[in-house]
Image (spheres, rainbow, N blue to C red):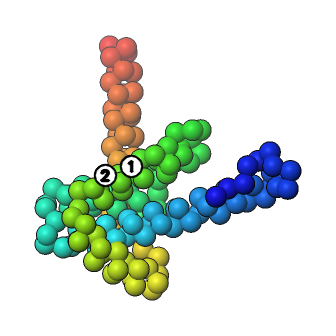
Amino acid sequence: MLPKPGSPTVTYTHWRSALLTKLKHRACALKREAYALYIATRDPRVPWYVKVFVGLVVAHTFSPIDLIPDFIPVLGYLDDLVITPLGIALALRMIPSEVMSDARQKAEVLLQQGKPISRAGALMVVAIWLVIIIAVIWSVVRIVSGQAA
């Protein structure tokens, strides 16, 4: 439990440090759950449509590139603070509990061997940005050529 910021024995710095530590632990737990989801998608007891959804969530979670870059004010952190946890929470509800239990055990062992990075996730994010850039360029060219005619 976090100490209250106004308590006389706790300074703001200590309170902030405790909050950051708690958030780091939650982020690690979230990554562990995402990796367990990745392992669960390989289980034959999981329906194909769940595998597709979980695959997208896991690829996004482990992608070294953010869908919405963090330097964009407010929206940049929306990706990390809202989209990823909601995707993982929804995916966890879609997979049978016994499959997740097995996957969590395997994930714990595999995570001790190293940090997973999703090349597919990075490619997905790059592809989305390329589509957006191409759409913007195409729109600008249409507007400019329409006005020139």
Percent position of residue 81, x then y: 50, 49
* Residue drawn at point x = 37 percent, y = 70 percent: 35
> In the rendered structure, are the residues bearing label 2 and label 1 in contact, judged by CB atoms less than 8 Å apart?
yes
Percent position of residue 142, x then y: 32, 24
Q: Mark 1 points at which residue?
A: 86
Q: In this view, does 135 lie above or below 19?
A: above
* Residue drawn at point x = 21 percent, y = 64 percent: 96
Q: How many labels does the image show?
A: 2
Percent position of residue 141, x then y: 36, 28
> Crowding near pointer 1: few (<14 within 10 Å), some, many (20+)?
few
Q: In which quarter of the image is the N terminus?
A: bottom right
**What residue occupies the far right of the structure in this picture?**
8
Q: Mark 2 points at which residue?
A: 90
| Amino acid on which the number 1 mark rests in the picture | Leu
Q: What element carries label 2?
A: helix
Rendered image quadrant of residue 111: bottom left
Asked if residue 122 shows in the view, the reply is: no
